[in-house]
Image (cartoon, rainbow, N blue to C red):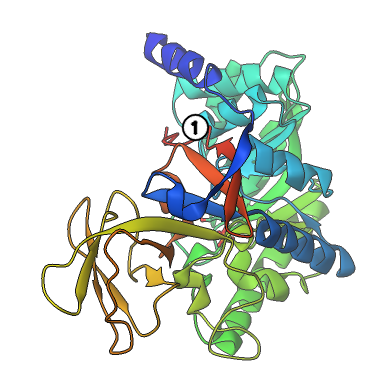
Amino acid sequence: MNHTGFELAADLLRARPSRPVHLETAVPIEELPTPALLLDADALERNLQRMQEFLVGRGKGFRPHAKTHKCPLIAARQLDLGAAGVCAAKVSEAVVLVNAGVGKVLLTSAVMTPAKAEILASLSLEAERLDVVVDSDEGLALLARAVSPDSDLGILVDVDVAMGRTGTRDVEQMKALADAATVTPGLRFRGVQHYAGHLMHTAPYEKRRDRSLTLWQTVAGIVETLAASGFHSEVVTGGGTGTYDIDSEVACITDLQVGSYIFMDQEYRLIGGREGDHFDDFEIALQVAATAISQPVPGVITVDGGYKAFASDSVSPVPLDLADTEYRFAGDEHGVLLLGSGSQEPLLGTVQRFITPHCDPTVNLYDYYWLCSNGFATDMWPITARGCSW
Ligand SMILES: Cc1ncc(COP(=O)(O)O)c(C=O)c1O
């Protein structure tokens, strides 16, 4: 197989910037080029610390998912706070992270392409700790062929209980994968992953809790079965922002793969928390700023941000600065605001801020975050793994 395409693509990723750019003079948010992705530095830091303190308080580790931020600078801060490592969803994200010096990475999706297996094998020699999930004999065989005997690529068996997206449900196959990882020079069996993505947005809280704990009971049984066959799991990882305070009760889990908590978004706000209709354990740290560019009819204002500025699979962006106002997508470059009765004042030329509908794919639309504090942008942080979808 010709691997030139993969090698070229990886080389281009390695050339991308990952360092922060500090602005000599802070810029008011109203003077940024819009649409602009704003990251509230103080809210980000509070979210990072809140999760860390919560999980450490419950005796759990955390392995935050870097698919949310795609930014080595944020990954480095998560590691500083004691993360067991960070997760990457794709090989290309792992290339960016390791290249930028993020030493501990778990790839949470299975690899079934020889060139990707080879890239991972060479990354495992560069990284302090590289792990990858497997859910098939074919996938494990690919990795076994790609690694050199002196590498130490960690293998986690991806366990599916109910979601039906990736992972295996066959316990005999799990044992066979653990065994193959144990006996293959260059590979090491490290444990299991279980991610129930379909539960993350289940509302209300009690339903989410019951379902998640039930699934984890099955996983706990699997972990015991593997151990009884001689395969001890040093890592049992999974869960996300929607279940962080539920899954952290599960004894067998070693670390939580929380992602969106650092930014939060409207989809997550609506799932409800332990104590109310809004899930507000974490602050809205990520916003998009857009400029009001047109007022086609009274009561309606058009901003310069549409599908290319906000990604959504369900809900709309939420205006932060205008009460009682609804955003509607109006094409690739535009959104219209249906103004509430109290906000008929002239708005043309003003910059409006919005809560993002879905943070991860929205981040993927931008090259950098404008890091903001008290209404001013102070730094630009490159979203180095932006567009890394292979
Ligand atoms: C495997 C895996 N782990 C963790 C997460 C993080 O989830 P969240 O952003 O809900 O915290 C995701 C998100 O899709 C995921 O796919």
- Please tell me which residue lies in front, 155 or 338: 338
Number of labelled discs?
1
Q: Position of residue 166 (x, y in %)?
A: 48, 51
Q: Residues within 10 Å of mark 1 (few under 14, many from 20)?
A: few
Ligand 1 falls in which quarter?
bottom right
Q: Position of residue 130 (x, y in %)?
A: 70, 31
Residue 167 appears in view: no
Figure check: 120 above or below 311: above
- Ligand 1 within 8 Å of the CB at mark 1: no
Left or right of 367, for residue 187: right
Q: Residue at x 67, y 57 (%)?
A: 44
- Please tell me which residue lies in front, 105 or 319: 319
Which residue is under mark 1? 138
Q: Quadrant of residue 45?
A: bottom right
Left or right of 269, for residue 155: right
- Which quadrant: the N terminus? top left
